[in-house]
Amino acid sequence: MCEDSRVIIFLVTVLLRWCATYHPYSGQGKPPMFGDYEAQRHWQEVTFNLPYQEWYTNSSNNDLQYWGLDYPPLTAYHSLLLGYAANKANPDYVKLGDSRGFESDGHKLFMRLSVIIADILIYMPAMFWFVSKLQITDSEKVNDSDSNIFALKKRDFILISILIYPGLILIDHGHFQYNCVSLGLFVAAVTAILQRKLLVGSCFFTLALNYKQMELYHSLPFFIYILSSNIVYKKQSLTIQFRKLVFVALVVLITFAVIWSPFLLSIEVFFNVIDRLFPLARGLFEDKVANFWCTVNVLYKLRDTFSNLTLAKICLVATLVSVLPSNLDLFRKPTNEKFILSLINTSLAFFLFSYQVHEKSILLVGVPVLLYTHEDPLGCFWFSIISNFSMLPLYAKDQLLVAYVAITTFYILSFYSIEEDPFKNVNWNRLAIRLFYASMVGMLFLTLGMFCLKPPKRYPDLFPVLISLYSFEHFFLFFIYFHFKQFTSDTSNNKIKSM
């Protein structure tokens, strides 16, 4: 990947993100709770003004019912850093109590820039690093047409298709969150692990997990791959293998200890943090998420029959059963390709069957899918489109329809400009074409229905529910498809360089 192409890709993808920032954010002008934008601002207010012992504790200065901090300490430290920057820019942004619901053009610019900077510093470099390690001949071109005016190579096009994924752009730079931080650390961890840099990879993943606890979706494949790849590495003695695993464990423990050290000084403070990170009281799922439990709930009201504790236990069993096949296969044959596929399958199992799932959690599946783009362009593109579509009710709530249509259309046109014949490497060609276009037509009709038709008074959430059911059907079929890909993958296929 040449220097000029990297600059072009960087500028285009940053510009696309910046375009999304001009649209509304979550909860804009909607008191009293506003939305995720206000949640992030409020965390800056709390961490900047209060001692760390009170960050996760309910008090007169920190009402946990009003967007209480519910992510691990690394998110809190990030909020603290942004709190200092906000106070420098304008003390009104983070004035304790008085800044609740603060909105202004200047503050919107500050908040939007904070996400762009995090994306540029963490997520984008991680993706550049990952793609640079793919075993692809740089002379390989995807599209030899005159439209390729910058003479970009296959590696460049793969990077572009990854960085313009609409789901992450719309959630982070439209809706407003910092998923680019945890997902960037996750991608860096994957890249390091696949290069046999186990200590670096373990540190990166521990950082990701301590930024957002939902990185637990990816934790089992990391553990299995590190363990099994050392066990099957016959050229090394048992002593060396054991020593490597001990070093990995030490890196994880030390990283955890450093991040959590302030909160370990008091048992009460520590358990306050844990209680905020894993709140059973929130229920099985939120809004109309496209997973198994929300689908079942349409026909049978689970929450009216079972307590939250019982539902959590059911979800735990269902999730463990659903992640076993993929991870057992990874343990038996720990190849690079199977590792990425196991990350996809395990995170999708968590999304479909675990407790307290948000619609935005599909990003935890979407990013591992992006890492498989070089192997299965059509399958990964299809999943990316559906995962983005599954969040349409959220975009509608945030008034992001224009941004959704524009960025999704750009993504689709970019894919077709890259892949002249996206079906050429698909064995079941005719069936693939029919299924793909039928899926796209169904998605289009549901989108038009949601914004052009008025639902019956008896069913005000008709279209969000239909979108949820339609997306779940796709996710479940993709769950089967990616398992098939993992079980039939070539055990000698390692298209990430090992160094």
Image (cartoon, rainbow, N blue to C red):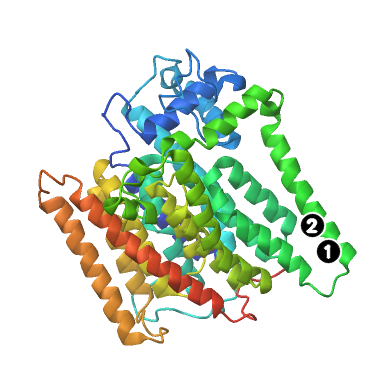
- Element at badge 2? helix
Q: Nearer the viewer, residue 215 or 18?
A: 215
Identified at 38% across, 40% down, the residue is 176
Residue underneath mark 1: 241
Alpha-carbon distance for marks 1 and 2?
6 Å
Q: Nearer the viewer, residue 226 or 135?
A: 226
Relative to 22, is 371 above or below?
below
Q: Is residue 374 visible?
A: no
Q: Nearer the viewer, residue 330 or 421?
A: 330
Q: Residue 439 vs residue 333: left or right?
A: left
Q: Count all numbered tags in the image, as a single digit.
A: 2
Relative to 343, is 294 above or below?
above
Residue 117 place in picture, x, y as percent: 49, 42
Tell me, yes or no, whether the two marked residues, 1 and 2, touch with CB atoms within 8 Å. Answer: yes
Residue 82 place in picture, x, y as percent: 51, 30
Looking at the rendered structure, the kind of residue marked 1 is Gln
Residue 338 marker? none
Identified at 31% across, 48% down, the residue is 288
Residue 445 place in picture, x, y as percent: 17, 63
Identified at 35% across, 82% down, the residue is 421
How many C-alpha atoms fall within 10 Å of the one at disc 1: few (<14), some, or many (≥20)? some
Q: Residue 336 vs residue 478: left or right?
A: right
Residue underneath mark 2: 245
Relative to 281, is 83 above or below?
above
User: Residue lying furthest front in this view?
Assistant: 305
Q: Is residue 37 visible?
A: yes
Identified at 16% across, 44% down, the residue is 460
How many C-alpha atoms fall within 10 Å of the one at disc 2: few (<14), some, or many (≥20)? some
Quarter of the image for residue 389 reads bottom left
Looking at the rendered structure, the kind of residue marked 2 is Leu
